[in-house]
């Protein structure tokens, strides 16, 4: 270990910025992750409730917790994650080039991305839709009233296309102002350049809570103009890794469906329900099948919580985002979250 | 002017109308009606603009640590914003408790640059000093040795990032640029056309397209086993860019060397390598050091473009500081502060380059 | 004796390794091999990577529907237009900002350059303060500053400031009346090249006349009259339509007429003020390069001030000014690509959006580079031709 650092310093001397991250073999992301001992997780540069770093560099948020849960499943340690903040344009390159192992960055699952960008979506962690935010002073009640209005958009997203589709369908003659970075688009909107800001509704809630000078001055319009299923994606080179990530997501959902929480997971391990026993590793070899420890789901739930806990902790009603479960409730509560059976 | 008068023995003092402050004013401010008009107009503009500007900058400004609400009451600039955010602006997201390290690293780098400004130290060992400086910088920033906590490059930000991009850009590009310049003047047609093609291609496109190329395409160009981080990618683009511009500067230097120097070297029986290394290049490079410094200034400013590919340099760090909703109203203060930092660096470097140009020329005249 | 001499003068045959010609060939072969190897390495990696990640390649996407809006366009464009057309819109926006920027920066830079040589001390100080300050601050910072200043400090769209003549200024930008498109306008525009051709013919004729008779014919005003007169006559014949489309108040500010967006304003402000500081230095150096003796000699020949400037000083100053000036114009054009940072839809911004929508990184970036390279090389070529024309012909 010491030797490697010394070599690192020597390289630094010659070429102060060479940063060879642990070299991974193509086709074996999971093996490489196990070898290097942590997961490199691509997150948003800063979206309150989803992924945001505090001044100490500690990351929190729904997308961050997904990475933590996976780390707990692989290593038994939710902190075995390193974060790479990515912007909208660079996220796919970061993933496909191997800079990150997983992209957990409020990314919309679309056919084009799934089929032609060299990546695979592992599931949905947040069912969202694109909405509009306007200042209350504009007295707009519906997105259909935005005729001729300027709308701020961030480039590199599905948002731009949805906006164009919506405007075409409703003959709204919207004037878009397209920004390269999230920061610039927020500055422009809150500076008054645009009448409306459009992105995923969860993003609007997040921006309103964190970036509005006074959140009560801004209104999120009721219409959602698109489907935005957000979820983590992995590279197309390792099916095992893909499968593992997918099933960690299901495990978090299954835990909520079965009433397992981070608080009661220890007791639940000795539950009489074989389904719960299988999930928590007391029965069968589900973990081994995925190539990780049998306590994979146990560790994830114990250290990070089930999906419901993650949701409420980061974006739920008690947070500044005030988001209702809505589509993201379990199917038993009328939502869309439906975990495949762990058996 | 007055000092000269005191030392020069003068038989007759000039009449008061051409000497002294009044004479000076007449010559410089009121010589013609147009001149008088310009003077009055400028004074009017200054009188209109300067007092409010000074009021805003200094007299009505809010200093020290206060809440943003206090600032919103005030008429002047809110420098409290800077005292609140200067660490974010200067060091980005570098771990807060470890920020003494970038401070030292930046000091080492600046000390190294100031040290190299002295012409007496322009010797071969200066290269070793630079390597040592970069090593100290790297060790401090990276950590991982001597009990320093390792800090990954994606946490680097602010001034150290800006400086290292510019310094490494020039240091690595410099040898490349010499090769390119020699290639462009070579009699070998293929070597020449490669050099010309490279130089003109790079100089013909904007830096931002190279940065995009580096951040989107470089990963595609390399095998899967080689992974390079965002900082290194931007650095590669900056090196490629700088090399093309420096090559043209060096070529200018090579062209300024009289033919006799080459002939003399050949007459002494020196081969191409020795002729270049011992006779031509030392003179050529010495002659173009001022434009090299100017290229460095340009480079230093251009590193701000990495903000567009999301590297937290000085400029992007400032933007992040401004995006705090509580302080967003004080964006002018943030930009003025960071503009001042850039200005200090560039201004002193350009003054140095002008001074150098004069003193190098003085040597020629002797 | 003679034989001996010959043997002395014939140099010993160098070993092939030391023969400069052979060495040059070997070096070049090595270079080609190196470049080809690097090329093969990069291309094969790229192909492998593209295949592995199942990324499609090729420029076929240019015909597909773009599906996104562009905020300001010079030619008709809608979301249903193709990516190719989107690129064209971006290119035209780049050219628009470059041309306007070059003109304004030249004017401002020339004024400041002359002011730096002013007899007036205050003016001299002020202009050098301008130059020293602005050129030592990164352009991107200028742009961010101007954009933030405009979006924050301009009046809200609902309370747009009326600057008179139905010109409105607000956070939406500057909106002003614009003539409604009539056939007569288009005819007048088409007539403009004819006017210019007429003026050129007139100056040729005047020159020939002066050569023959020695009599000077005033050039400036008649030429201007021809250039502007021809389109004016066409417009008058076309019925002199002067119907203006006036901005109207809507729910969100104003609509109709023509508009300059804050993004465009910020970009122009930043580019012009920054580039002007460099142009000022070039102009100053150019004027200083013409020695005072030239003007005095012209005076001694009996030339008045105007002709002295026009026939003696300017041609010589221009010879010094034009090459660096061209490179500043090129810099301005290349720097206009920073528009992407403040939301002005230039070529880079459109290409960037396309890249994100299609994932075709190589294609989009190569298009950007090809366009800029074409512009740069053609301007550089034109400049070389011009330089050869005005170069001093020495004996």
Image (cartoon, grey):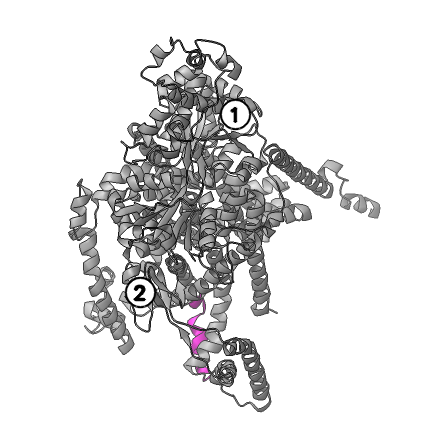
Where is residue A104 shown, x and y percent of the image? Answer: 44, 31
**Residue A279 falls in which quadrant of the image?**
top left
**Residue C174 falls in which quadrant of the image?**
bottom left
Where is residue B271 shown, x and y percent of the image? Answer: 63, 40
Specify the segment rendered in magenta.
C286-302
Where is residue C394 shown, x and y percent of the image? Answer: 59, 68
Secondary element under disc 2, as helix, strand or loop, is helix
Q: Nearer the viewer, residue C86 or A132?
A: A132
Q: Nearer the viewer, residue A214 or B278?
A: A214
Position of residue B95 in the picture relative to residue C338 (left or right)? left
Number of numbered markers: 2
State the separation of the CA atoms marked 2 and 1.
68 Å
Give the label on residue C349, or none: none
Residue C212 seen in the current view = yes
Position above or below: B339 against B46: above
Secondary element under disc 1, as helix, strand or loop, is helix
Circle 2 packing at 10 Å, graded few (<14), some (14-19), many (20+), is some
Circle 1 packing at 10 Å, graded few (<14), some (14-19), many (20+), is many
Tell me which residue sits at (68%, 46%) in the image.
B190
Give the label on residue A242, or none: 1
Where is residue C316 shown, x and y percent of the image? Answer: 49, 70
Q: Which residue, given by chain and number where applicable, does mark 2 sit on? A: C124
Question: Is C297 included in the stretch rendered in magenta?
Answer: yes
Question: Is C122 included in the stretch rendered in magenta?
Answer: no
Q: Quadrant of the C terminus of chain C?
A: bottom right
Q: Nearer the viewer, residue B305 or A193?
A: A193
* Subunit of label 2: C
Position above or below: B255 against B47: above
Tell me which residue sits at (48%, 24%) in the image.
A245
Q: Nearer the viewer, residue A293 or C108?
A: A293
């Amino acid at each position: 270990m010491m030797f490697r650092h010394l070599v690192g310093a020597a390289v630094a001397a010659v070429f102060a910025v060479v940063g060879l991250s642990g070299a991974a073999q193509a086709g074996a992301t999971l093996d490489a992750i196990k070898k290097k001992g942590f997961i490199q997780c691509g997150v948003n540069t800063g979206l309150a409730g989803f992924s945001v770093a505090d001044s100490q560099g500690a990351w929190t948020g729904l997308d961050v917790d997904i990475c933590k849960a996976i780390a707990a499943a692989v290593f038994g340690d939710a902190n075995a994650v390193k974060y790479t903040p990515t912007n909208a344009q660079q996220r796919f390159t970061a993933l496909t080039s191997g800079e990150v192992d997983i992209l957990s960055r409020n990314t919309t699952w679309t056919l084009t991305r799934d089929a032609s960008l060299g990546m695979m979506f592992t599931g949905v962690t947040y069912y969202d839709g694109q909405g509009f935010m306007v200042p209350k002073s504009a007295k707009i009640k519906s997105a259909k009233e935005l005729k001729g209005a300027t709308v701020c958009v961030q480039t590199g997203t599905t948002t731009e296309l949805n906006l164009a589709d919506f405007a075409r369908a409703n003959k709204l003659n919207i004037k878009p102002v397209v920004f390269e970075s999230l920061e610039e688009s927020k500055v422009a909107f809150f500076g008054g350049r645009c009448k409306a800001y459009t992105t995923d509704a969860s993003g609007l809630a997040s921006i309103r809570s964190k970036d509005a000078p006074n959140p009560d001055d801004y209104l999120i319009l009721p219409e959602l103009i698109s489907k935005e299923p957000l979820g983590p994606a992995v590279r197309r080179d390792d099916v095992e890794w893909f499968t593992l990530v997918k099933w960690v997501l299901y495990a978090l959902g299954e835990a909520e469906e079965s009433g397992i929480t981070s608080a009661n997971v220890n007791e639940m391990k000795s539950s009489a329900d074989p389904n719960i026993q299988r999930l928590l590793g007391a029965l069968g070899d589900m973990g081994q099948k995925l190539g990780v420890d049998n306590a994979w789901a146990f560790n994830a739930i114990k250290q990070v919580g089930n999906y419901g806990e993650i949701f409420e902790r980061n974006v739920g009603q008690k947070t500044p985002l005030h988001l209702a479960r809505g589509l993201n409730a379990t199917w038993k509560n009328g939502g869309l979250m439906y975990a495949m059976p762990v058996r | 002017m007055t000092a000269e008068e005191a030392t020069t023995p003068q038989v007759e003092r000039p009449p008061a109308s051409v000497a002294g402050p009044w004479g000076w004013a007449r010559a410089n401010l009121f010589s013609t009606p147009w001149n008088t008009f310009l003077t009055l107009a400028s004074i009017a503009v200054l009188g209109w603009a300067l007092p409010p500007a000074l009021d805003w900058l200094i007299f009505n400004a809010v200093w020290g640590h206060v809440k943003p609400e206090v600032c919103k009451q005030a008429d002047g600039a809110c420098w409290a914003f800077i005292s609140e955010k200067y660490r974010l602006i200067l060091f980005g997201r570098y771990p807060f408790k470890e920020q003494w390290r970038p401070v030292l690293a930046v000091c080492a780098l600046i000390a190294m640059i100031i040290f190299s400004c002295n012409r007496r130290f322009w010797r071969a060992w200066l290269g070793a000093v630079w390597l040592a400086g970069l090593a100290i910088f790297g060790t401090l920033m990276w950590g991982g040795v001597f009990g320093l906590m390792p800090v990954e490059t994606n946490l680097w930000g602010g001034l150290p990032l800006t400086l290292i991009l510019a310094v490494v850009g020039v240091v690595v590009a410099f040898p490349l640029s010499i090769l390119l310049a020699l290639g462009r003047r070579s009699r070998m047609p293929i070597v020449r056309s490669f050099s010309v093609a490279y130089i003109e291609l790079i100089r013909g496109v904007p830096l931002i397209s190279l940065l995009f190329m580096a951040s989107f395409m470089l990963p595609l160009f390399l095998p899967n086993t080689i992974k390079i981080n965002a900082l290194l990618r931007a650095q590669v683009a900056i090196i490629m860019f700088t090399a093309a511009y420096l090559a043209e500067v060096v070529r200018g230097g090579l062209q300024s060397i009289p033919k006799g120097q080459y002939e003399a070297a050949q007459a002494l029986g020196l081969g191409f390598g020795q002729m270049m290394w011992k006779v031509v290049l030392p003179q050529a490079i010495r002659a173009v050091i001022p434009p090299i410094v100017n290229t460095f200034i340009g480079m230093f400013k251009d590193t701000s473009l990495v903000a567009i590919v999301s590297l937290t340099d000085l400029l992007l760090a400032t933007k992040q500081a401004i995006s705090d909703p509580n302080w967003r109203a004080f964006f002018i203060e943030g930009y003025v502060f960071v503009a001042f930092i850039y200005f200090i660096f560039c201004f002193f470097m350009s003054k140095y380059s002008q001074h150098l140009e004069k003193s190098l020329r003085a040597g020629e005249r002797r | 004796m003679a034989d001996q001499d010959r043997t002395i003068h014939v140099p010993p045959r160098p070993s092939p390794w030391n023969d400069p010609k052979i060495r040059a060939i070997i070096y070049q072969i090595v270079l080609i091999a190196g470049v080809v190897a690097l090329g093969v390495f990069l291309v094969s990696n790229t192909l492998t990577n593209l295949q592995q990640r199942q990324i499609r390649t090729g420029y076929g996407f240019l015909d597909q529907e773009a599906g996104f809006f562009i905020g300001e366009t010079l030619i008709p464009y809608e979301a249903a237009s193709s990516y190719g057309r989107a690129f064209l819109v971006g290119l035209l926006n780049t050219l628009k900002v470059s041309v306007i920027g070059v003109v304004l920066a030249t004017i401002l830079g020339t004024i400041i350059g002359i002011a730096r040589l002013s007899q007036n001390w205050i003016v001299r100080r002020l202009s050098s303060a301008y130059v020293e300050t602005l050129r030592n601050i990164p352009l991107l910072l200028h742009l961010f500053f101007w954009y933030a200043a405009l979006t924050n400090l301009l009046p809200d769209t609902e309370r747009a400031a009326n600057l008179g003549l139905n010109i409105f200024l607000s956070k939406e930008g500057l909106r002003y009346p614009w003539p409604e498109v009539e056939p007569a306008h288009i005819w007048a525009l088409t007539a403009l090249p004819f006017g210019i051709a007429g003026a050129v013919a007139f100056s040729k004729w005047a020159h020939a006349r002066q050569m023959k008779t020695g009599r000077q014919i005033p050039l400036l005003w008649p030429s201007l009259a021809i250039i502007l007169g021809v389109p004016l006559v066409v417009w008058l014949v076309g019925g002199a339509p002067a119907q203006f489309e006036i901005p109207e108040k809507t729910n969100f500010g104003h609509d109709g007429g023509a508009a300059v967006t804050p993004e465009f304003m910020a970009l122009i402000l930043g580019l012009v003020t920054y580039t002007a500081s460099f142009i000022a230095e070039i102009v100053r150096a150019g004027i200083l390069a013409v020695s005072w003796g030239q003007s005095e000699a012209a005076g001694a020949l009996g030339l008045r001030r105007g002709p002295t400037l026009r026939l003696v000083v300017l041609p010589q100053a221009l010879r010094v000014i034009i090459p660096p000036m061209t490179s500043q114009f090129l810099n301005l054009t290349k720097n206009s690509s920073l528009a992407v940072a403040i939301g002005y839809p230039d070529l880079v911004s459109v290409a960037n959006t396309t890249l994100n929508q299609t994932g075709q990184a190589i294609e989009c970036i190569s298009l950007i580079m090809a366009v800029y390279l074409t512009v740069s090389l053609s301007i550089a070529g034109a400049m070389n031709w011009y330089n050869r024309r005005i170069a001093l012909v020495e004996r």
